[in-house]
Structure formats: C-alpha cells, structure tokens
Image: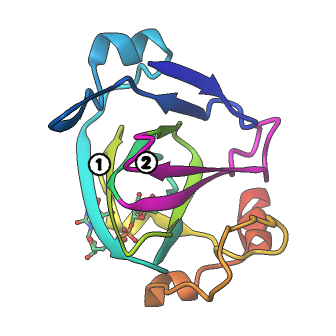
Amino acid sequence: MEVIKTTIEGVMLVKPKLFSDGRGYFVETWQKERYEGCGIDLAFVQDNHSKSSKGILRGLHFQKNHPQGKLVMVSYGEVYDVAVDIRENSPTFGKWYGAILNQENQNQLWIPPGLAHGFVVLSDTAYFHYKCTDYYHPNDEGSIRWNDPDLGIEWPIDFEPLLSAKDSKAPWFKEFRKELVK
Ligand SMILES: Cc1cn([C@H]2C[C@H](O)[C@@H](COP(=O)(O)OP(=O)(O)O[C@H]3O[C@@H](C)C(=O)[C@@H](O)[C@H]3O)O2)c(=O)[nH]c1=O
C-alpha cells in the first residue's frame, strides 16, 4: 500500500495493493493496523454505500458539530472525488483537492474531519463506499454549492451535473465564511 500526501493538510491518497489473477482481483480496503500506521488512526463508526448514475454530483457536504473523517473508495465505475478544506484555522483553508477514484486503480481518499466532500460520477454507474469516524446527524448537515466560483473546483466534466434538490440550493462559500465570523 502506498499513501501519498496531497496539497491539503491531512488529506491523503491511498493506493492499496491489488492482487490480480485469472479470476479478477483482490484488495484489502481497510486494515486497522496498517491504516493506523499510516496516520489514518481515528476509529470508524459507520460504513456507507451509494449507487449513482453518470452525471450525478453529490456534495459538497459536511457536518458542523459532528465532523466526519471519511475514507472513500469506488468499487465499481469511476468518480472524480473532491475534498475542500473548510477548517477555519487550516493553512489550506479554502483550497480543494480532487482525484479520480475508479474500479481499476482502487484508490482511496482519506479526508480528515472538518472538510467538505463531494463527487461526480464519470462512468455509467458508480458504487461508492466510505467509512466514517462519526455518525450521521441529519440536523447537523451543512453544504456548499458545488460550482462556487470562490472555490474554483475544476470538475472534469463538460455537462451540467444532476443534483439533489438540497444540493442545488446549497449556500455559497461566502455565506459559509460569514457564519464563521459570527
Ligand atoms: C449520508 C446519510 C444519508 N442518509 C439518508 C438521508 C436521506 O434520506 C438519504 C440520502 O441522503 P443524502 O441525499 O444526504 O445522501 P448523499 O448526497 O449521498 O450524502 C452523502 O454525500 C457525500 C458527498 C458525503 O460526503 C456524505 O457524507 C453524505 O453527505 O439517505 C442516512 O440515513 N445516513 C447517512 O449517513
């Protein structure tokens, strides 16, 4: 397994070892001792799985008072996955990092608690899995608009993505910043 630091403080790209043979492949998607040894050492309490079709964009999401660290991966298909640093005191506040996660590379992104997260589906279908370090708290959810010009995320798409009703009305980053100074 290879773990690569990214341009965002604490965000890591994980490249697990893939064992391919005539039957297909095998991969350990998480192993406590090894991941902890690489600095992904918070306890996970919830696993999630979502299925999405091409063009679906989920995000950018975070929880305000129960921030979740997320170890995200794709078992089938391909997505462009994005983490945005919204930690007020972080040296990389307001910066984003994106990576292609797909069934071929089996790459994972470790997103520590406190960042916003989203992804867009590039294949016909994508199965997206993630481990979380805190529980889902529906009343604590926050979101930021996916195409916020102040964030300038370079989504690798030439189409208008399909969003949930909630995500299409998400606040702009400016509004999020205003809340921080209150
Ligand atoms: C996220 C989540 C949703 N749900 C329910 C609530 C709702 O009825 C339904 C769909 O919820 P959402 O529309 O919020 O699902 P989704 O847009 O897939 O939300 C997810 O997006 C990605 C980008 C993330 O980073 C995740 O943390 C999460 O926010 O599933 C749970 O029961 N538990 C959960 O942990």
The reply to whether residue 61 is visible in this rendering is: no
Residue positioned 38% across, 23% down in the render: 17
Residue 125 lies left or right of residue 146; in this view the side is left
Mark 2 to mark 1 CA distance (whole Å): 8 Å
Residue positioned 73% across, 58% down in the render: 180
Which residue lies most toward the front here?
Answer: 22
Q: Quadrant of the C terminus?
A: bottom right
Label 1 sits on what residue type? Tyr
Q: Which mark is residue 66?
A: 2
Q: Quadrant of the N terminus?
A: top left
Q: Earlier in the sequence, mark 2 or mark 1?
A: 2
Q: Which mark is residue 84?
A: none
- Mark 2 touches mark 1? (CB < 8 Å): yes
Residue 123 lies left or right of residue 28; in this view the side is right
Splitting the image into 4 quarters, where does residue 54 fall? bottom left
Along the line of sight, which residue is nearer the eye, 23 or 92?
23
Residue 150 vs 128, above or below: the answer is below
Residue 168 coordinates in the image, percent (x, y): 56, 87
Q: Give the magenta range.
A: 77-106
The reply to whether residue 146 is visible in this rendering is: yes
Residue 85 vs 120, above or below: the answer is above
Residue 110 coordinates in the image, percent (x, y): 50, 36
- Is 65 a magenta residue? no
Question: Is ligand 1 closer than 8 angstroms to the Cβ of mark 2?
Answer: no
How packed mark 2 is, by other alpha carbons closer than 10 Å (few <14, some 14-19, many 20 or more), is: some
Residue 158 lies left or right of residue 32; in this view the side is right
Question: Is ligand 1 closer than 8 angstroms to the Cβ of mark 1?
Answer: yes
- Is 82 a magenta residue? yes
Q: Which residue is mark 1?
A: 135
Residue 105 vs 123, above or below: the answer is above
